[in-house]
Amino acid sequence: MPKRKAPATNSANPNSGAIGTTGIARYLRKRPKTEPSLSPSPSLDPETSSSAHATNSTTPNTTSNDPIRAPHPFHETSSAHGIVLPCYPAEMSTARCHAYNNGILPRPIDQLNAALAAHNTSPPPGEAVIHWFKNDLRLSDNNALFQASLFAKEKGIPLVAMYIISPQDWEAHLTAPVRVDFMLRTLEVVKRDLEALDIPLVVEVVEKRKEVVDRVVEVMERIGARRLFCNIEYEVDELRREAKLAGLLGGKGMVLRAVHDTCVVPPGQLSSGSGKQYAVYSPWYRAWVKHVHLNLELLELAGTPEKNPPGTRDRLRDLFGGSIPEAPEGKRLAAEDRERFKALWPAGEHEARKRLVKFCEEDVGGYAARRNVPSLAATSSLSVHFAAGTLSARAAVRWARDRNNTKKLDGGNEGIQTWISEVAWRDFYKHVLVNWPYICMNKPFKPEYANIEWSYEKDHFVAWKDGRTGYPIVDAAMRQLRSIGWMHNRCRMIVASFLSKDLFLDWRMGEKYFMEHLIDGDFASNNGGWGFAASVGVDPQPYFRIFNPLLQSEKFDPDGEYIRKWVPELRAVPGKAIHDPYGRGAGIIAKKAGYPKPVVEHKGARERALAAYKTGIARDL
């Protein structure tokens, strides 16, 4: 594929081309001889959290009369049920959400952009340049990494890669142990690939998340680096962290180069006729397609980094050969599970590319017709690679488009254009997150939907997460998640609708549970999916979008293959009774096998949900 050339970076000192030794020697003297092991994280301190609230002077205050600072009237309930974690302030008010929408409170993306603009300097090159890996764990088509490599080559200095392990961030962000395992295995691949180019990977363990920014600066000072490159992450904590980092580096004569990479079309480049961000996918997607067609460079791929200058291994010898730490105890898989997931989900960009090529050559043509059938291996299963950044959405769209009979993203083979439109959902939800940042703070897209009074029935939640609701399609999906850390997308919608509308449990409990167990957990996509299914997100339609689990089961698993695979108690149930054994004459078989009766009756649950939505939305809280 054609490679995109990154723009040249500025330098105030064109004569600094040799590899310096002063800063490198200083780093080697101070750096520990062995990598620290990951110990269990200390409890998270709400006063030191890097959350959007904790770093804002108008943090919600439980005793304040100011509607922007006061918490939501239901804040005690959301905290008591673990929805708002102790490391974050109380659930914000509706007025605070509107303050973001109305520009009274700055959006985190605007804070980052302002910080980058205020400190957009061109210091001397320094003795090295650093790329900070985050959720972009690949060498190919990595915008920030490629720009860092070009700068290093231009100035004749080495490129050093860095990765920060922050156990408290994993706790605060509900990162699943299986996802932590996948990222650490991916780091092993990244480390090998970098070392083949004589590029060292420095892995730093920072036990307290408030100290991440200081550690980054410390590493730069030790190595003698004056420029730090990284790709932008769009969650609130990360945007504010990078804004703080930009200011801190600027004050020390250094500079942060934070660039867009995750999305095909960066957030902020699409707007409706009224000049606002789209809140509905269909018109947004039409604008997205049009924008890409008019800016084809968006699908050009960045190159891989150049090999470091000769002698780099000698000068930086102590930066090579380090090991990747184990996961902290609270995020560590058992040895047997590590081996099982290693076989199920091979890590790294090379495996991602293999899976992409196989899917595009063998399955994408039939994707539109087969993608909703969970018993078929008809989807790409690339979500884990998108989440970890071992594959860019840009490369995926480009690869699929180049195998179509047209260069139009919305034309030609139906399977290809449908799959591209599904990949684009990832862009859409990140665009939504950037423009409405409070969804990253336990709030629904429409703030007034926070006034719905949900149930917190513990037995119902346990039945749902254990796959024992008495609804076979729901139970099969939940057991698949517990077994392999992944669930088919159609089933994600079914179980999310069931939790929020049949059991009428707070949708955020399900959103949290997914993040705690998914190997492909991505905040924006997970939140967007739950917002859709629970009718609290963009384009909510609460009075129409209520899935009937029985009809969903019959439509998308007509022969019960998926159910029989994941619910072995029902394998002996014949024919269509598999979808509703107690309602279709197979209750004796199901009961004898230990399968439970339905925990709720769908029709009554639907009516209760409709009434609760109507009452809650009408409240003025």
Image (cartoon, rainbow, N blue to C red):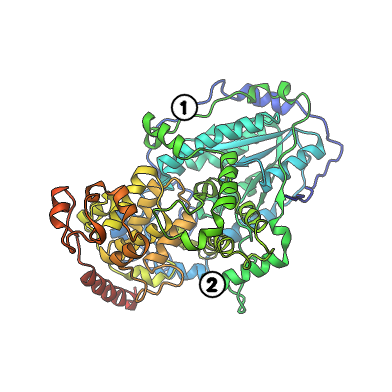
Q: What separation in Å lies between label 2 and label 1 (alpha carbons)?
A: 48 Å
Q: Residue at x 69, y 58 (%)?
A: 298
| Residue 259 falls left or right of residue 122 | left
Q: Which residue is drawn at 22% across and 54% down?
A: 573
On screen, 324 above or below 546? above
On screen, 581 above or below 150? below
Q: Which amino acid does label 1 sit on?
A: Ser
| Residue 431 falls left or right of residue 7 | left
| Residue 290 falls left or right of residue 537 | right
Of the 4 image quadrants, the one containing the C terminus is: bottom left
Q: What element carries label 2?
A: helix
The single residue placed furthest to the right in the displayed view is: 15
Q: Given contact means CB atoms under 8 Å apart, are the residues at marks 2 and 1 in contact?
A: no
The dot on residue 37 is: 1
Q: What residue type is labelled 2?
A: Ser
Q: Residue at x 32, y 62 (%)?
A: 553
Looking at the image, tell me whether mark 2 or mark 1 is earlier in sequence order: 1
Q: Can residue 132 be seen in this view?
A: yes
Query: Picture coordinates of residue 588 (x, y %)?
Result: 12, 54
The dot on residue 282 is: 2
| Residue 144 falls left or right of residue 485 | right
Q: Mark 2, mark 1: which one is toward the viewer? A: 2
Q: Which of 496 and 74 is in front in this view?
A: 496
Q: Is mark 1 on a helix, strand or loop?
A: loop
Query: Picture coordinates of residue 190 (x, y %)?
Result: 60, 35
